Structures are given as C-alpha cells and as structure tokens.
Image (cartoon, rainbow, N blue to C red):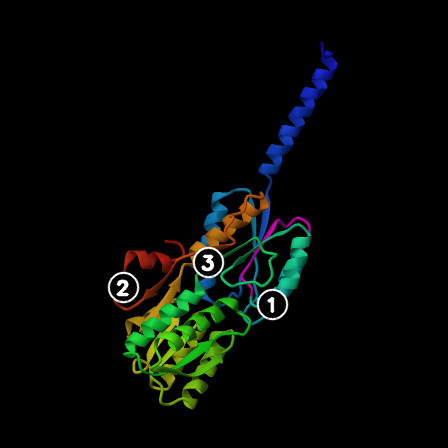
Amino acid sequence: MRIPMKRLFFWGLGCLVLVASVVQAAEKDLHIVFVPKSSDQVFWELMRAGVDQAVQEDPHIKLTWRGPAHNDDVDAQIKIVQTYTRAGVDAIVIAPTDRGRLVGPVRKAVEMGIKVIAVDSGLDGDYHVNFVTSNNYAGGQLAAKTLSELLNKKGRVLLLRTVQGSASTDDRANGFLDYMKTKVPGIKVAADVYGGGSAGKARHSAAALLRANKDVDGVFAVNESSTDGMLRALREAGLAGKTWFVGFDTTDFLLAGLDAREIHGLVIQSPNQMGYMSVKAAVAAISNSASKDKTIFTDTTMVTRENYKNPEIRKMMCGRC
C-alpha cells in the first residue's frame, strides 16, 4: 500500500515535534528548594558545600536555599515549605525541625506533584521519596561506647539534647541510652534534658544541669549547638578537662576544645556527602528513577585528639576540600 507523500510529511513532522518535546523535557530547568534546619550552625554550611557541588555538576538545576534562623523555629520552617508549595517547584529537600509537624505541609507539596527528599533528620509518614542521613542511632551508641570506656564502665553521666521532635538527635539520644542500659550497667544516666535549639540556649541549660548535678563524671551532647553550649558551660564551671565529654558534630571551636583535651570525642557525620546525595536523589525522583532504598546512609566516625588530623577525617570535616 502506498502512503501519500503529504501524509508522510505530516507524520515525520509529528515525530520531530515529539522527539524535540522529550529532549526539552529531559533538559528543562529543575527548581529544587533546599530547606535546612537553621542558618546558625557550621553543619549546614558544610552541607551547603555538598549541595553546591551537585548543582555545579548539573547546569539544569535552579537552587533555592532557605531555612529558619534556629533549629527550634518549627513555625518558620513550615511557612517556608508552604511558600514553595507552588507551580514551578520540582522538588523540596528538607531537614525537618519536627518529624511530626512537617508532615502536613509536606503532604500538600506532594499532592501538587512536588517530589520531597528528607535529609539529616527523619520525617513521619510516607510522603517523602528518600531519606538521606547518618545512622544516628548507631552514632549515639558509638558515643556511649566511647564515653563508657573513658569512665572504665562506671560513674554518673548527663545527656544534653537539643529540641523535642528532632528525629536525628532523638535517635542519637536513644542509641546512647539503650547502649548504657543494656551494656554498661555500672553507668547511671543522672539527667536527660532538652537544652534548646541554639548554642546560647544550650549553654544556659548546660550550666543549670551542671549546677544541679555537681557529682558527675561524664556528659554527652547530641549535636553541634548542644556540644558548643556544654563546652562553654563546663569552662565557666571550672570543669572543662576534668569531666569526660563526648559530643556530636564539629566546628573550629569544638576542635580547639578537642585539642585542649576539654572534649574527649566527637561523633562526626559527613554533611557535605548528605547535601550532595540529597540533591542527586531529588533529581532522580523528578525523573521517576528514584533509588529503591528508602533510606540512604552516609558516613559517621568518632574523632579524637589522636586522629582528627588524618586526611580522611579532615575531608569529612571540610566543606570545600
């Protein structure tokens, strides 16, 4: 059967339009909104470095980075998510300040066709495509193991958390408590308190905690701000270097405390890796090729005065090395 030339022409033209549309869809700009927990901690600066690396590798990504000032300002983070739940946004990557209260705003974003990736801290529900994080429970257990060995498996310790509803830091605290309860019966956790979402609030809470527990042998703080606040409070109380202290995350200030033997261990994550992998996960989700592994784990290790200058560890702590 002979096909008329006119019909062949329009059929070929239609094929060209279809191919062009597919190519255009594959190469269209992708608007990804990244919502960190706060803007007052070095941790998020390190994560931003990983995000920027992923963006530089893909010229089609348009990035918006916007988060609350402090990690206890849940209302501000909710408003940010609501602001960017709109047409033209392809994906939201969020480090939830509250694992429960962010579910509603995230659900509305997903209902609009926006892909959501959780990073660093967990999110209730099943609306997010992937969760990129450290194994925070294991990190808390590593902190407990280190502190218990420093104490020869006996003594009284304090636990300083940050804010209620923060899944990542609560997982660390729970890992710490479970390890002490099941493996080190000679150590008693004398107090377990939430210290607030900033270093300043943590400092005041830590000072009150130390005043109320004068006969204490060791402390564990669950994140950058609580570790910072506890170190300052220990110094003010004349206990820095005399009380065994394990913290979480790192800054130049905390490394100086480690070098001065005022901090005896820091569990560090790889926020750079988290930022990079979360953006890659967002791009994959937009193209409907997301990883089948719901949770994507990144690296965690214990840093001490003896190993913190090792090249591998320095790379984890450096945002743009």
Q: Which quadrant of the figure contains the N terminus?
A: top right
Q: CA distance from mark 3 to mark 1?
A: 23 Å
Q: Position of residue 104 (x, y in %)?
A: 66, 63
Percent across and percent down for residue 21 are 64, 32
> At 47% across and 67% down in the image, what residue appears?
41
* Cα–Cα gap, marks 1 and 2: 38 Å
Mark 3 or mark 1, earlier in chain: 3
Q: Report the magenta residues as a range.
A: 85-96
Q: Main secondary structure of the magenta part?
A: loop
Q: Which mark is residue 11?
A: none
Choose between 236 and 94: the one closer to the eye.
94
According to the picture, the residue beneath numbered tag 2 turns out to be 307
Secondary structure found at label 1: loop
- Where is residue 84 drawn, in percent x and y? 65, 56
Looking at the image, the residue that sits furthest to the left is: 306
Q: Which residue is more in the foreground, 133 or 319?
A: 133
**Amino acid beneath label 1:** Gly
Mark 3, residues whose alpha carbon is within 10 Å: few (<14), some, or many (≥20)?
many
Query: Badge 2, how many Cα within 10 Å: few under 14, some, many 20+?
Result: few
Residue kind at label 2, given as amino acid type: Asn
Q: Which mark is residue 47?
A: 3
Q: Earlier in the sequence, mark 3 or mark 2?
A: 3
111 w.r.t. 263: above or below: above
Question: Which mark sits nearer the N-terminus, 1 or 2?
Answer: 1
**For residue 65: magenta?**
no
Label 1 CA crowd tier, 10 Å (few <14, some 14–19, many 20+): some
Residue under label 1, please give it. 100
Q: CB under 8 Å between callouts 3 and 1?
A: no
The residue at the point 63 percent across, 69 percent down is 75
